[in-house]
Amino acid sequence: MARKTLLKRLGARNVAFVSNLMEAGIEFATCDNLHASRLTIHVLAAEYAKAAPEKNRLEKRLKEIKPVLLQAMTLRPCQPG
């Protein structure tokens, strides 16, 4: 989890940014995968870059339907049992 958080905070949605950091000689260390190579870091950055548009679409859709869901929950509360 620490690896993902750090990469996201570094701007991993931009693979070129991570690549430029690597080219500049910046070393990456991961807490949960001590043997992560430069390739592993690069692949993770590409994965996050690919997932970013889908994440944005989901967040937008959830914001749109949240009021409807809350209203439905108040009209028909769940009954135990």
Image (cartoon, rainbow, N blue to C red):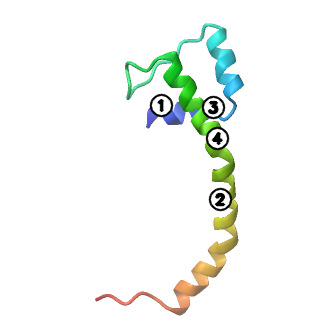
Helix, strand or loop at mark 4: helix
Residue 12 versus residue 67 in the image, above or below: above
Q: CA distance from mark 4 to mark 3?
A: 10 Å
Residue 51 versus residue 75 in the image, above or below: above
Q: Residue at x 63, y 31 (%)?
A: 12
Helix, strand or loop at mark 1: helix
Q: Which mark is residue 3?
A: 1
> Given the image, on which type of amino acid does mark 4 rest?
Lys
Q: Mark 4 or mark 3, which is nearer to you?
A: 4
**Would you say the residues marked 1 and 2 are in contact, meaning their CB atoms lie under 8 Å apart?**
no
Q: Mark 1 or mark 4, which is nearer to you?
A: 4
**Residue at numbered disc 2:** 59
Q: Residue at x 38, y 25 (%)?
A: 33
Relative image position of residue 10 (x, y in whole percent): 62, 29
Q: Badge 2 local density, few (<14 within 10 Å), some, or many (20+)?
A: few
> Given the image, on which type of amino acid does mark 1 rest?
Arg
Mark before the other along the chain sequence, 3 or 1? 1
**Residue at numbered disc 4:** 50
Q: Badge 4 local density, few (<14 within 10 Å), some, or many (20+)?
A: some
**Residue at numbered disc 3:** 12
Asked if residue 19 lies left or right of residue 7, the reply is right
